[in-house]
Amino acid sequence: MVMNSVKKIRESKMMSKAELARKASVTVQTIDRIEKGNDCRLDTKRKIIMALGFKLTDRAKIFSDNNSAENKGGKPARLKR
């Protein structure tokens, strides 16, 4: 399970799951799964970060990956721009 603030941020912006999904070019089911703590691809994270109005450098404010390579002593995962 991945900890994230997607639901909290989305709700603070008065945005529906459907609106976020549309802006991020993903399905509502994807948003639902992510908000429930399921993992997703880096590209999907990038789309959600941008759709919420954040910069990619703000990713730690939205996604705190406890399972990332960074926390396992490896190289940190990078989001593509």
Image (cartoon, rainbow, N blue to C red):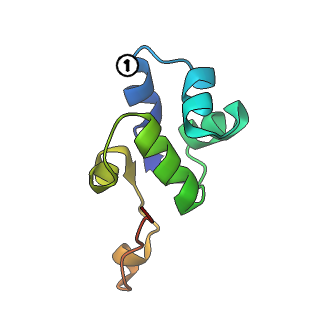
Residue at position x 38%, y 29% from top?
9
Q: Quadrant of the N terminus?
A: bottom right
Residue 31: which quarter of the image? top right
Expressed as whole percent of the image width and height from the top left, the position of residue 25 reads 63, 39
Residue at position x 42%, y 73% from top?
77
Q: Nearer the viewer, residue 61 or 57?
A: 57
Residue furthest front in the image = 81
Secondary structure category for the residue under label 1: loop
Expressed as whole percent of the image width and height from the top left, the position of residue 40 reads 60, 55
User: Is 21 rendered above or below residue 34?
Assistant: above
Q: Which residue is mark 1?
A: 13
Residue at position x 35%, y 19% from top?
12
Residue type marked 1: Lys
Residue furthest bottom in the image = 74
User: Is 33 rendered above or below residue 23?
Assistant: below
Q: Quadrant of the C terminus?
A: bottom left
Going by the image, does 64 lie left or right of 39?
left
Expressed as whole percent of the image width and height from the top left, the position of residue 20 reads 54, 28
Residue 34: which quarter of the image? top right
